Image (tube, helix red, strand yellow):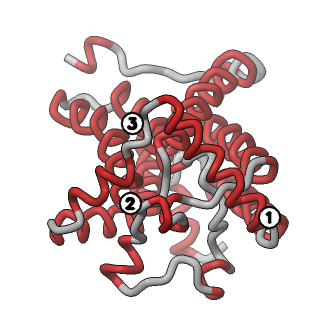
Amino acid sequence: MPGPLAAIGRRLPRGWSDLLLQLALFFLAYQGYQLVRGAVGGRSDLAFANAERIVDLEKSLGTFFEPGFQQSLLSHTWLIDFANWMYVNSHFTISVVFLAWLYLFRNDNFYFVRNMFMVAMGIALIGYMLFPTAPPRMLTAEGFTDTIATFTSVNQDSNAVSLLVNKYAAVPSMHIGFSSMIAGTAVMLVRNPLGRALWALYPLLVFWVIVVTGNHYWFDAAAGLLVAGGSALVASRVLAPVRPTQWAFRPVPEEATA
């Protein structure tokens, strides 16, 4: 291995081989997402029918608040711009940066979180396959607005974007799933009280963003939260005992927190 790469490898927690293994695992998970995207791409009728089922459920519960809430904010352009920016950028960027920080600086807990993410993505892919769902922004008759298309001229449903994104992957909302798993981990690892408080609020901010932009129903968010909780349970009760020295979660000791 060339000198510069060898020097970097010595600074990695477990060397290049382990880092490449982690990248390969997430690449395989992404390929699974792409396979599901291709499989459900032509099932638009089912996706819209499932969306209407969610709308009917929320109406029957008296909780179909999303269109009115979104419409009340559309005149506040700066808020919508912020929500659009967060939706487009935060899901990928914050998730990747946090996982990179965890791998490099809290490596003893990375593998538990990695397992949690893998389980969550597996459950989500099953949900996308069995219950493809059109997002709210596609139901204009229900009063929804596609804020990203309206305010940024970016068509999320264009052929180019559809090559990368499954537009019928509304249930579960992995914006909520990922943000909840990241926030839960950060609250237990970050030592600064203000930092903990901000991370605890992160999933609530993400929920606000996905509703304001018309990309998810509250039902999707609830499903995403259940996936996050179930994945944490599987990672701790099923996977951690298999390799407890590497796959178990290790909270920051109280004296270190103090």
Mark 1 vs mark 3, foreground winner is: 1
Q: Is residue 102 left or right of residue 25?
A: left
Coordinates of residue 80 in the picture (x, y in percent): 25, 66
User: 235 or 243: nearer the eye?
Assistant: 235
The residue tagged 2 is 90
Is residue 165 left or right of 39 when viewed as pictured? left
Residue at the top extreme, as displayed: 254
Look at the image and tell me in which quarter the N terminus lies.
bottom right
Provide the secondary structure element on which disc 1 rests.
Answer: helix
Q: Nearer the viewer, residue 231 or 11?
A: 231
Q: Residue at x 23, y 66 (%)?
A: 74
Distance of mark 1 from mark 3, alpha carbons? 31 Å
SS under mark 2: helix
Left or right: where does residue 75 sit relative to residue 43? left
Residue at figure coordinates x 39%, y 36% from the top left: 183
**Amino acid type for the residue under numbered disc 3:** Ala
**11 to the left or right of 157:** left
Q: Position of residue 27 (x, y in %)?
A: 70, 62
Q: Is residue 36 above or below residue 151?
A: above
User: Which quarter of the figure is the C terminus placed in?
Assistant: top left
Dot 1 crowding, Cα within 10 Å, few <14, some 14–19, many 20+:
many
Helix, strand or loop for disc 3: helix
User: How many numbered badges does the structure rendering display?
Assistant: 3
Mark 2: few/some/many CA within 10 Å (<14, 14-19, 20+): some
Q: Is residue 257 above or below residue 157?
A: above
Q: Residues within 10 Å of mark 3 (few under 14, many from 20)?
A: many
